[in-house]
Image: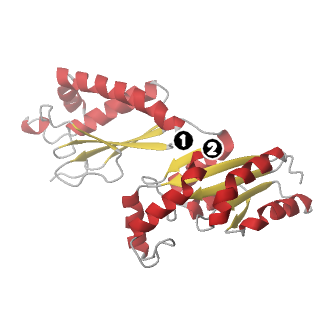
Amino acid sequence: MNLLGTQVVFVSGLSGGGKSTAMAALEDLSYYCVDNLPPLLVEQFLDLCGKSTPPLAKIALAVDAREDLFIAEFPVLLDRLRSSGARVELICLDCTTDELINRYRETRRVHPLSPTGSVEEGVRKEREILHEIFQRADFMVDTSGLNVHQLKETVTKFVFEGVRGTTVNLISFGFRKTVPISAELLFDVRFLPNPYYESELRPLTGKDQPVIDFVLRNELAAEFLKKLQDMLGFLLPLYEREGKAYLTVGIGCTGGRHRSVAIVNRVRDLLKREGREVNVAHRDVGDLG
């Protein structure tokens, strides 16, 4: 079997983690996509793709954790395909157990590895089965905080450009409401003086210069920003090494209108100076209550 010049992308991961979305992204990139191909037919299928007219040079295959025999032999298959001249990449999709439980609850589906039990039990079994495949991944994506469009964009960037630096999503919020469930790192800046108690600042937000000056001129704010910058400088390269596409950082104050907004915007500026890709959302700025 000669697959010289053929690009093969395998997509694996936890059920409910976004495999269908990832495959749709690859299909949009003109990959010939096949889901749940019987394991014993993979090499035969790829050989036929190479003999078709014209040859199919871009192929994406989804790997199902329910195929125990295939999972056991998968590392050997990867090595064999690469030795045949193909460019082979493995994208694996991870997700927090809590997020997967929410997704299954919303769709009212049962987990394929726990049809009569709990989703949590099915996720646990699947993690065990996929452990070795995850260890071989060329690109790991934590889909917990990603919507459909973000996941498609992440897969597209990897295919076109290889692994990129972790994008930082910054969210300002008020603890008076709920903590954003998508945040992986949470920081509380309620230790800073509150502009709400200054009558001329109360109607403004952390986007307005008087509030920015009030918040950032405080020595505690400067010290906090320095420590947070140091922490992110330590963590982000580690997340990148694991292939994490997005890191969501929540910064909260009481109402989510003053301190957290000013701090988030300052963190954004610091990260952008370092060449980071940063997205910002001010969740509660529109709330005047």
Q: Are marks 2 and 1 in contact (CB under 8 Å)?
A: yes
Q: Which residue is drawn at the image coordinates 66% and 39% (left, top)?
A: 161
Q: Amino acid at mark 2?
A: Asp
Q: Amino acid at mark 1?
A: Gly
As drawn, 275 above or below 73 = above
As drawn, 192 above or below 243 = above
Q: Which residue is drawn at the image coordinates 82% and 50% (left, top)?
A: 6
Count every numbered label the image shows and give the total: 2
Q: Which residue is drawn at the image coordinates 41% and 67% (left, top)?
A: 121
Q: Which residue is mark 2?
A: 138
Circle 1 sits in a helix, a strand or a loop, which is it? loop
Distance from label 2 to label 1 (Cα)?
A: 8 Å
Q: Which residue is mark 1?
A: 243
Q: Earlier in the sequence, mark 2 or mark 1?
A: 2
Q: Which residue is drawn at the image coordinates 50% and 71% (left, top)?
A: 113
| Left or right of residue 19: residue 285 | left
Residue 146: image tag: none
Residue 83 x %, y % = 82, 45
The one of 39 and 224 positioned closer to us in this rendering: 39
Residue 263 x %, y % = 27, 33
